[in-house]
Structure formats: structure tokens, C-alpha cells
Amino acid sequence: MVAVGAFIVIPKLVAGSTHPLRVGVVGTLSPTARTEILALKAVIARNVELVDVADGAAAESELRSRRLAVAVEDSRQVVVRVTPSSSDASAGARLAAGLAAVVGRDNGLRAAGLGDAQIATVDRVPPLAVRGLEPNHSQRDRQKAATLIGVILILVYLQAYGTWVLNGVVEEKSTRVVEVLLAAIRPTALLAGKILGIGCMALLQAVALVAAAFIAAAAVGSHVLGGGVTATTVELVGWFVLGYAFYCSVYGAAGSLISRQEEAQNVAFPLQLPLLLAYFTSFSALTGDRASGLVRVLSFLPPTAPISMPVRLAVEAVPPWQVALSIGLLVAGTAVMLRTAAAVYVRAILHTGQRLTWRQALRIQAA
Amino acid sequence: MLELDRVTRRYGSVVALDALSLTVPTGTVVGFLGPNGAGKTTAMRTVFGISKPDAGEVRWKGAPVTADDRRRFGYLPEERGLYPGMRVVEHLVYLGELHGLSRGEATRSASQWLDRLGLSPGATDKVEALSLGNQQRVQLAAALVHGPELLVLDEPFSGLDPVGVESLSEVLAEQAAGGVTVLFSSHQLDLVEHCCQSVAIVDHGRLVASGPVEELTLADPPVLEIEIAGVADAGWMASIPDVTVAGVTRGRTRVLLQPGGDAQAVLHAAQTVGPVLHFSFERRRLSEVFLAAVGAR
């Protein structure tokens, strides 16, 4: 969570100085012009401060000593230290240009006979909304970056929580408390309870992580999470939840095959392979900006879909029916896995000696 | 009333239960006896659905056992198991809730049982910090905490010291008096004789003898106990027909009188050997009943 916060806050911190640009005001300046000058902050990305100055001479000396960035005299003239060139894109130059335009416009509106209230109304007219047909490059890049981070977190968390479920099952088997529990409740309830309990923790952690990212972004005014990234994040959390349900059932079944903690790593390793495959293929898809045929296939298979489908969504337009199919297969796969896990669980639990193989366990289930 | 009706369970080619039928009447303590591997543990597991019978059924109050019934059963499995890292009282409360008690009820009941079993001082210790004997007591409390209607205890006395044995016997008697049906297995036959109204003896997955302890121990063949001054062995009996020497302890010889055997003839023979200090008809010990029942092995 700290890492996510830092990821958002640090770029903002190194983005340069933030002290305000000072505008010297000599003589009169209408309140509407003052409001509009302060609003230039949004254009130049720096705070603007208005300072009243006694006369033109004082303004000039303040400009030369750089205590003022720009001055406006009697709403008639804008003064800067160095004559602006057309290529100057500094905040100071943009402020001077903006100031000249704002005050000139204000004078014009007054000459046309408008009063303060009418000018304020005109000034408050918002610009029209602009609708883009395709996301621009920086949005796409941010979505891809969010997807990459999301995919890494999905990989790490699915393994972490899966292992947690696995260890819980193995602990109950190795300490034999399972027989006491199963005398009172059904094995499906025991397994589902474990998955749900740890799942709530996992979801809470995922939501906390995402919330921390958004809060940090809002606090420092970062736009890293703006635009399509919010939607991408919600989507990733959704895939995480689906993947979690699937993998925890698998890990639960794996746990019931063994009776000692030392064997946990051996039985868990093969379960990590599909995730790793999905991860490595997604990495090249995200950097190369196109989904290979392999990624497309993986995006439909329940063990890899939680990673491969969001990756496809980030790099290409996926038809909605394909997303629906992938989710459907994942949900169905989870249901099958949960039932298998429960069956393997109850049968394997009474085998305390040697480790059962998957094949034996499934044969037991079929019998 | 708990009934096992022709329950059969096979593991591969091994027949663990062979059409085993068994009845435990409500409010009685029934001892479940049998040599190792006779099927006692499997039979107990079938009551809880942990082992599914291939044939036959387990009934409670006349109807097949349901998941709801099982929540009102208490089970002490042969292989003890608790979460080692959990605190004793929390563990009991958790199991109580799992069996349908509210948190408040479970807490009250847990502390009562901890008190009763002398575990109160360690109530907030982790299970793994307790001695094995005390862990065994906690396990017992775990079977009792929800006030079950049926108690199934697999070897409840193993690992207990004499004080623990005595208090468990009392608990079982109390529970039965309160209407709880109790089935427990044990190899300590003198204990079983002391605690149970009736016993069921199984061998090779089949019921080989059952009934009230009184009836089984009074049943044929009659037993004679004889003590003769100055005679420490039973060699003098070799010539008497239709008697079997069951053993000699502290100078007293126990004799099984087979059909056709004559107690008076034995007494006469004894008097010719020396002054008879003791001559009585005794009931059979449960161990003798047991060995006779599984003796064909």
C-alpha cells in the first residue's frame, strides 16, 4: 500500500516548485478581472497571487528585482521585465499573455455596456465538453500501466491467499481437528467457509489498496488514476475476485491431498504454473501492445483468464460476448472445482498416511 | 436411541464393518468392545457421516441420521485433534457455536466444563501449552460443550490418570442419568464393567456378543473361585472332567465349569488336597466374556 502511495505521490513531489506567481496591481482593477486573473492558475498550473502596488515606479522596481512576475497598470497596460518572445512557454510568459487577454476582454465587455454581474455571468460560462472517439496515448498508457500493476498484484495475491487456504486445510488435517469439525458440519461448508473468510480478508486488502491509491492521488492532485484507469481498476478487482474463488477451491482440494505441512510446497507448485504462464505472456502483450493468439486462447481458460482477459482488454477491443464467455467459463469452472474440492476433501481427509495423487482422489470422487 | 442397522463398510478388499447391527438405548452407557481392527472406530465414524456405509443405515430416534441431528451429537475421535495455536476457552466456544449454540451460551457452557474438568487455571492458555492429559480433557470438553443428546467417545479413557478416569466415569454416569445416550469404546475392560449398563462386543466387523453387563457376566458357564491353604497352583484339578482353569491369582484359582461339570465333585477334590479356605460361585469377569466372545480368533 505504501508502495502504491509512493508511486502516485513521488512524481508529483519532484514535479518542481509550487510557490505562487505574484501579479502587481497598480490603480484600479475590476473585481471580475481579478477573479479571472486568479482563475489563470488552471491554465498555467501555478498559483497566482494579486498584490496591490502603490504606483508604476514601485511596480517596475519590484519587477526588476523579480518579486513580481507581471504587473497591470490602471487596467490599461501589462508590464513584464523582459519583452516576451512568441516561443516562450514559461509559466511567467503564459501568465502575462493570459493576463493581457483577460483584462482586455474585461475592458471590452465594460465598453459594450455590461455591468459586474453580467460580466461575471459571461465569465462563468463553461467551455463545451469534448468527446474523443478513441482514448489518447497517455490514457492508453496509463490503462496499460494500471493493468500491469494489477496483473502483478493478482498473481501475487492469488498465490498468497491460495497458499493460505492450502495451509489452513493442511493444518486441520495434520492436527486432526478436522474430524471434530466434520462431525458437526459438512465438508463443503467447512471449505466454503474457509474460502469466504480468507476471501473477505483478501477483498478487504485489495479494496484498501485501491482506495489508498485513489486517496493518495486525490490528496496530491495526481491524474495518474484519472480517465479510463478507474474503470480498469474496478475491472481488475472483479477479475481478482473471480480468480480468487477459482484458485482457492483448487488450493483447498490440493491441501486435502496431503497430510503434512512439508508437502505443501510440492503440491502447490504445479498450481502456480498457469498463473505464471498467463503472467509472462501478458507482459509481452502489454509491452508490445498486441495480444498474441496464445493470450487470446488463455483469456478463455479458467486458470489463466483472471490475468489474460484484463490484459486483452487493455491492449485491444474485445467483443463483449467473448468477455461474457470467459467469465461464464470461469464461474462454471469455479463451481466444478468447488464440488471436486469438497469431494476430494472429505475422502482424502481420512487418508492420513501417504499423499494421495490427484488421479486417485478424482477416482475416489467418481466412485 | 441410536441404531446401526446392518451397516457394511469396505475399504478395497478389507471389510471393516460386516452388516453390523447395534443398539444404544436412550439414557444408557454402552461400552463398545473389540480387538484392535475390529471396526469400532469405523462404526463410530459412520454415526457422524465421516465414513459412509456401503450398505445399511444409522438411525437416531428411529429415523436416518441427518446433519441437524449430528449437530446435537458429541464426538471424541480416536485421533485427538484441536487447533494447537488456539486458546482453550476460545476453542471450546468456537466448537460450541459450530454446534449451534449462541456465543453467550457457548461461553457459559465452556467455562462450566473447564471448571468441572479442573482446567479453569489454563483456560486462556493455548492448547499446545497444555500437558497431553489436559489436552485430552479439553478434547472431552469439546465433545460435551454443546450439551449433546448423544455422546460417541472413541477410547475416552486412554491417556488419563486415575483421577481423570474417576472424574470421566462420574461425568458419563451423570450424563446418562440426565438422559444422554452414551457409546464409548475402550480396551480397559474393568473400567467398562464399572461404567456401563451394557456392552457390545465386535470382532471382524460383526457383533459377537451384546447385552447388559449383568446378563453377560452371569451367563454360562458358571465360574468357581477356590482357595486351598498351602496350595498355590491348579495342578490338582487336571483329573477333574469338564472344568477349565481360567487362572490363578494370589492363591485363588478361577475355574470355568463346562456343561456336565459338577461343582460338588470339584469341592470334594479340593478337600482331599488341603483345607478349603474359600469356595464360591462367581460371576464372570467382563474380560472372560470378551475373550470367550472373540476367542475363536
Image (spheres, coloured by chain):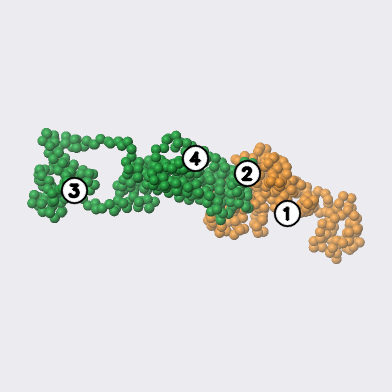
Q: Which mark is residue A88?
A: 3
Q: Position of residue A136 (x, y in %)?
A: 32, 41
Badge 2 marks a residue whose secondary structure is helix
Q: Are marks 3 and 1 on the same chain?
A: no
Do labels 2 and 3 touch, CB within 8 Å? no
Do labels 2 and 1 touch, CB within 8 Å? no
Task: Kindly report which numbered mark, 4 or 3, lies closer to the viewer in this rendering.
Answer: 3
Left or right side of A301 for B201: right
Q: Amino acid at mark 1?
A: Leu
What residue is rendered at 16% in x and 34% in y?
Answer: A118
- State which chain disc 3 sits on: A
Q: Label 2 belongs to which residue?
A: A364
User: Residue B224 is drawn in which quadrant?
Assistant: bottom right
- State which chain disc 1 sits on: B
Disc 2/disc 4 C-alpha distance (Å): 25 Å
Q: Position of residue A261 (x, y in %)?
A: 56, 54
Q: Label 1 belongs to which residue?
A: B189
Q: Amino acid at mark 2?
A: Ile
Q: Are marks 4 and 3 on the same chain?
A: yes
- State which chain disc 2 sits on: A
Q: Are marks 2 and 1 on the same chain?
A: no
Q: Label 4 belongs to which residue?
A: A330
